[in-house]
Image (cartoon, rainbow, N blue to C red):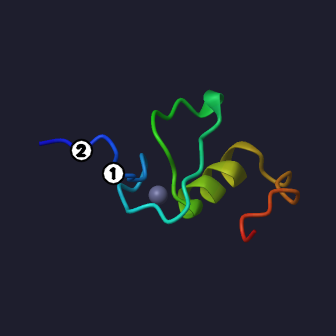
């Protein structure tokens, strides 16, 4: 049985501590963990992610 409410990362399938919503242009359906989110950020916006504070 699928549980739609369980929060798993759409990329690494790991459990999400704090869910991050992916940007539309990333084409990702679901939520991301902090790791994958910051990875995607640096992939899509290299050198321009200083203002993203993931530790807050
Ligand atoms: Zn992840």
In this orientation, which residue lies closer to the viewer: 25 or 9? 9
Q: Residue furthest left?
A: 1
- Residue for point 72% across, 71% down: 55
Q: Position of residue 36 (x, y in %)?
A: 54, 56
Quadrant of the rendering where the N terminus is positioned: top left
Query: What residue is shown with label 2?
Result: 3
Helix or strand or loop: what does disc 1 sit on?
loop
Q: Position of residue 44 (x, y in %)?
A: 70, 43
- Residue for point 50% across, 66% down: 17
Helix or strand or loop: what does disc 2 sit on?
loop
Q: Position of residue 52 (x, y in %)?
A: 80, 57
Disc 1 under 8 Å from ligand 1? The reply is no
Query: What residue is shown with label 1?
Result: 6
- Residue for point 39% across, 52% down: 7
Q: Residue furthest bottom?
A: 55
Quadrant of the rendering where the C terminus is positioned: bottom right
Q: Few, some or many C-alpha atoms within 10 Å of disc 1 (few <14, some 14-19, many ≥20)?
A: few
How far apart marks 2 and 1 lie (CA) works out to 6 Å
Looking at the picture, does residue 38 appear above or below residue 27?
A: below
The reply, left or right, for residue 53 in relation to residue 3 is right
The reply, left or right, for residue 12 in relation to residue 56 is left
- Residue for point 46% across, 33% down: 29
Q: Few, some or many C-alpha atoms within 10 Å of disc 2 (few <14, some 14-19, many ≥20)?
A: few
Give the quadrant of residue 15: bottom left
The reply, left or right, for residue 7 in relation to residue 38 is left
């Amino acid at each position: 049985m699928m549980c739609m409410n369980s929060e798993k990362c759409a990329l690494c399938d790991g459990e999400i501590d704090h869910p991050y919503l992916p940007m539309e242009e990333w084409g990702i359906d679901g939520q991301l963990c902090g790791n994958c989110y910051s990875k995607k950020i640096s992939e899509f916006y290299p050198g321009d992610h200083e203002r993203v504070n993931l530790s807050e």
